[in-house]
Amino acid sequence: MVSSPHEAMHRIFQEHPGLFSRVSEVLGITIDPPVSVTVMPTDLTENRPLERRVDTLLRLDTENDEPLLLAIEAQGKKDTDKPASWAYYLSYLYTKYRLPPLLLVVCQDRATAEWASSPVPIGPRQWPALTLRPLVAGPHNMPVITDVAEARKDLALTTLAAITHAADPDIGAILKTLSTALRDVPEIIADPLVELTAQGLGNRPAAQQWRNLVAVDLSFYKSFMAEEIRDEGRTEGRTEGRTEGIAQGILLFLAQAGVDVSDEARGRITTCGDLETLNRWLLRAPTARSAEDVFAEE
């Protein structure tokens, strides 16, 4: 039951809307007296489902610090609607999991990165109730890695750095460093990085440079992209072999993560003959907590 003090502490502002400007002065900020007031509905329940999906969500547990939720968004251009969505994501995650959420935005051009980096105050300028402060990774702060020894120290960071610098004038040297660093790496590690690099470059001119490097420097790999380069024009039977390889890679990632895979899920993976679908599943498999996470958006 709502108590009388509870009611009095907020209803007085309904009865005397101008009171807030005087209270704000007492609290050390200045809000001008209102010239008009509209009493709004207090029910904040969403009456219809509204689909909201963050690109990637990870729970990070460490030995020394408390767990945190890492929401990752890939942002290709400025979008004035995004800050409101990002603020919603963080508020929802904190409400649902009671863990500190952190937003990481990954960009490929400096203008978008600088836009995404700007804090967004939510509330009146005199006293913002919340301030959205994304952590941003992009060409403005990611390293340009052109030393093979440095690249080999952290292949995942080197891959992400190459993707964020896709439009860099030195992208050729960056990609050459990455392909050289991957030469002596086991296929199970190298293959996903080769594919992620290809996807990250998109349809930029650098994408063809990467294909050429894979064909020459990594020709002994049986990565999905390398096979595509070498086997163009071959029979459909070859494609079936590729789908089987991707399916086995998905199952291997799930096994390494300790995920139980039902016979139904295993059958769905091994009988899928669509390369595009299998590649999507492959990208989700390393961070999946269940087999259903692999099929989440299908």
Image (cartoon, rainbow, N blue to C red):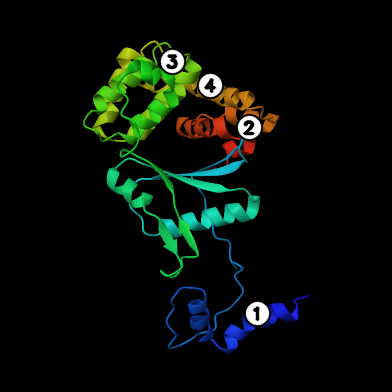
Which label is found at residue 194?
A: none
List the residue tagged with mark 2: 63
- Categorize mark 4 by other alpha carbons within 10 Å: few (<14), some (14-19), many (20+): some
List the residue tagged with mark 3: 222
Circle 2 sits in a helix, a strand or a loop, which is it?
A: loop
Give the camera-side residue of 208 and 288: 288
Real-space Cα distance between discs 1 and 3?
A: 69 Å
Q: Which percent across, then down, holds residue 125?
A: 41, 69
Tell me whether circle 1 and circle 4 mark residues in contact (CB < 8 Å): no
For image coordinates 30% across by 18% down, the residue present is 213
Q: Nearer the viewer, mark 1 or mark 4?
A: 1
For image coordinates 25% across by 33% down, the residue present is 168
Q: Is residue 16 above or below residue 66?
A: below
Real-space Cα distance between discs 3 and 4?
A: 12 Å
Circle 1 sits in a helix, a strand or a loop, which is it?
A: helix
- N-terminal of the two: label 3 or label 2? 2
Mark 2 belongs to which amino acid?
Glu
Mark 4 belongs to which amino acid?
Glu
Give the camera-side residue of 124 and 192: 124
Tell me whether circle 1 and circle 3 mark residues in contact (CB < 8 Å): no
- N-terminal of the two: label 4 or label 2? 2
Question: Can residue 128 be seen in this snapshot?
Answer: yes
List the residue tagged with mark 1: 9
Residue located farthest toward the left when viewing the structure as drawn: 169
- N-terminal of the two: label 1 or label 3? 1
Q: Which percent across, then down, holds residue 184?
A: 42, 11
Circle 3 sits in a helix, a strand or a loop, which is it?
A: loop
For image coordinates 56% across by 88% down, the residue present is 16
List the residue tagged with mark 4: 244
